[in-house]
Every structure is written in structure tokens, then in C-alpha cells.
Image (cartoon, rainbow, N blue to C red):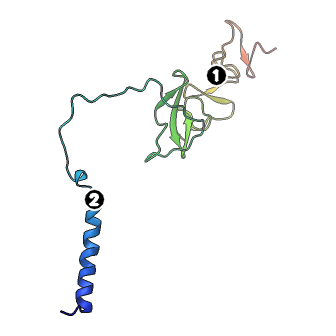
Amino acid sequence: MAITPLKVTSILFIIILIIPLLQIPLFSLAISTDLDDDEEYYTVDQPQRVRKGARCDSLSKNICNGVSVNNGTGLLQCCKFHCHNVLRDQNNCGNCGHRCGFGELCCNGICTNVVCNVDHCGRCDKKCSPGVKCEYGTCGYA
């Protein structure tokens, strides 16, 4: 019985088709819908630390969207592929891309005039004493 080039080609073709099928584990083909009631779940006590300006994207590395930070004083959002605190970021105030104007700072996610605001005089949350004016970002400027 002679082996012809056509038989060799047919055998190689069959081997090429079978080899990938042999590499698939059989247990991966089984789909189970039963949930084990005895499984343990862990609740994360402390979220991971996120570095200021860390890389992110909304599809795969979404490490910062909606994450509350610094004891609730910050809220991270993924803006232009980087994590930003939208409660304090001058260029992303309240949401991505919302820039504060001249003389304004981002205080709690709102662009706030800090030049003459007695509740935010010169910086966020710096209150002037009762009856004292805020002028040029200074309480009691004379």
C-alpha cells in the first residue's frame, strides 16, 4: 500500500483540526448553574489606595469612577484617562471637563469665587469671622 501525497495531506489536515480540540480542558465545557451555599465571601474593609493622576479608562482599568476618597471629602472620576478629584479639581469641577473661571476654585464640586466670598475666602472652606469682609481673597483686607 503506497502513501500518496494526497493521503499525507489528508492526514495532516485531520491532525491540524484535532490538536486544538485536545488542548481544551473538558471541565471548561461544562456549565454549572448551581451555586454552592457554603461559599465564603469577603467584604473589603479598606479600598485600595489610588495614586493622584493614576491611569484609567472607562472600559478596562476603571479604578476610580465614583470612588469616595479622603474620608468623603473627595470623589474620583476618570477624566481623559486619569483619576481626578472632581470635588477639588479646577479643570474638572463637579464633572470631567468643567473648568473654573478666573478667581474661582473648585470647592466641593462647585466653581466658587474665592476673591470676595466670606465662606471661601482665598481658598475653599476658609470662613471669615462674623462681620468681617472677604476682599481680594483675604479676610479683613484693609
Residue 134, labelled with which disc? Answer: none
Residue drawn at x 48%, y 28% as measured from the top left? 47
Q: Identify the residue position indicated by label 2 in the image.
A: 24
The answer to whether residue 95 is seen in the rendering is no
Residue 40's place in the image compared with 57, above or below, is above
The answer to whether residue 36 is seen in the rendering is yes
Farthest residue toward the front?
1
> Of the residues shown, which amino acid type is indicated by label 2?
Ile
> Of the residues shown, which amino acid type is indicated by label 1?
Cys
Q: Identify the residue position indicated by label 1 in the image.
A: 124
Residue drawn at x 47%, y 25% as measured from the top left? 46
User: Dot 2: what SS?
Assistant: loop
Query: Separation of disc 2 and disc 1 at Cα?
Result: 59 Å
97 lies left or right of 104: left
114 lies left or right of 6: right
User: Dot 1: what SS?
Assistant: loop
132 lies left or right of 24: right
28 or 108, nearer to the observer: 28
Q: Earlier in the sequence, mark 2 or mark 1?
A: 2
What is the quadrant of residue 142 in the picture?
top right
How far across and how far down the image is residue 122, in percent?
A: 71, 22
